[in-house]
Amino acid sequence: MNNLPTVNLGIVAVSRDCFPIKLSSDRRDAVAKSLTGKGVKPFVTKTVVENEKDSLAALEELKQAKVNALVVYLGNFGPEGPETLLAQKFDGPVMFVAAAEDGSLMDSRGDAYCGMLNASYNLGLRNMRVYIPEYPVGTADEVADMICEFVPLARILVGMASLKIITFGPRPHDFLACNAPIKPLFDLGVEIQENSELDLFAAYHAHAGDKRIDAVVADMQKELGTGNKHPGVLPRLAQFELTLLDWIEQNAGASDYVTLASKCWPAFQTQFGFVPCYVNSRMAAKGIPVACEVDIYGALSEYILTAATMSPATILDINNTVPRAMYEANKKEVGDFKECDLFMGFHCGNTPACHLKTPTMEHQLIMKRALEPDSEPDITRGTLEGQFKPGLVTLFRLQANAEGVLKSYIAQGEVKDIDPQSFGGIGVIAIPEMARFYRHVLIQDQYPHHSAASFEHVGKTLFDLMKVLGVGKISYNQPANLPYPTENPF
């Protein structure tokens, strides 16, 4: 996972000059000690910010320590001008948090509860979006817990600030839903490099006979084990994997992190001679997700999930309903979920092996029907298929609408241990109140069929991230007693 940033966290205490500076520094030290006990080692500036020159001094300390994520800690009321100037001039994600009272209200009252109000007002004056927890005031241990929740959020923001999405091929006509305006990505600081499939084709052939192919084939054989049904295609897949990795190294340019989106059919099979799904799954396992059908926003959504969890994400079609007979036969596993809460998440074979019960190298059934119906599979080989492992799941997508305005959705649920009795990377997914979410979010807000998926619950981080990014509409699967604005009350 070298494609993810490491968060180097810094804490700066601030102090209103009419309050004892020691009150703020002592409280800061208690937070730092608690954080260290939780496995997060912060850099603590010697400077406690009381005025603008202190802000500059603290910024220099942070720069020398290579801090890339900042916690502004109001140990007392805090100077709203200098503390927000500090946040404005810091190059990276910022969190504001404040101290609860913990001593005498005569000699050591800090009024940080009050100071957070002025801080938020001044952040607005500076047009700054920072992370502020739901209840941003607490004891040392409580603040340390809040900061721990900031770390994955910061990792995403640091990654996005130096991310390039590399694409291959035009976005296909049959998937116009993936054809969203990309200017909002530039507004977020994400770079886009669009390439032709011919560029990739030429690069692939330039890797013929690459001396590294045998080592990659051996690694694939080890990963697949007894699930290697098509060993003859592995050299082609290994050559393609090396092509992608070298392309990234040669084209990352000014960006530190890269994700990919590629057109993977139908000309891909006839020209390259395989299906790229298994390679895509291995790239995702390296922290470099690859979105199918040149789904640029899907690639970004996958990267966000990967950075949030430090675990491979995937992209899935919100694909098909679960047959009633299958639902009835698995009532014990389904539990309290209704039939309409269930659907099958599917894609051809790009989900990493670590998320599949029995990963198996297969051929793409639909493509074979079209491209080589009367012969043994050859050019349609290369999918990694299997049932998703049961457990938690989060569906997420960040998307621009036709007018170029960002929107998003988040839905947490479960992967059920039910045999989907089908092909591809596939599983039965249960989302509370899925039918209403499907109608009043996915359809109503015109989302495409692709959803990024993480096999963890990470909704809290994603929701806070969307707020920091300034995404105006954040949708989620609302509970039964909370109607959607477009839901018919009759």
Image: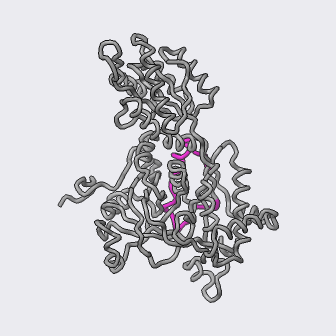
Whether residue 199 can be seen here: no
Does residue 226 sit above or below 280 in this rendering? below
The answer to which image quadrant residue 435 occupies is: bottom left
The x, y position of residue 175, in whole percent, is: 51, 65
Residue 465 in sight here = yes
Seen from the viewer's position, the closer of residues 141 and 352 is 141
The residue located at (57%, 31%) in the rendering is: 91
Q: How many marks on residues? A: 0
Q: Position of residue 47 (x, y in %)?
A: 54, 18
Residue closer to the observer: 51 or 85:
51
Left or right: 22 with respect to 248?
A: left
Q: Residue furthest top?
A: 18
Instruction: State the extent of the magenta-drawn residues as a range.
Output: 168-192
Q: Position of residue 10 (x, y in %)?
A: 54, 30
Chosen colour scheme: one colour
- Identify the residue at image location x=57%, y=83%: 369
Quadrant in the rendering for residue 260: bottom right
Q: Vertically, is 188 above or below 445? A: above
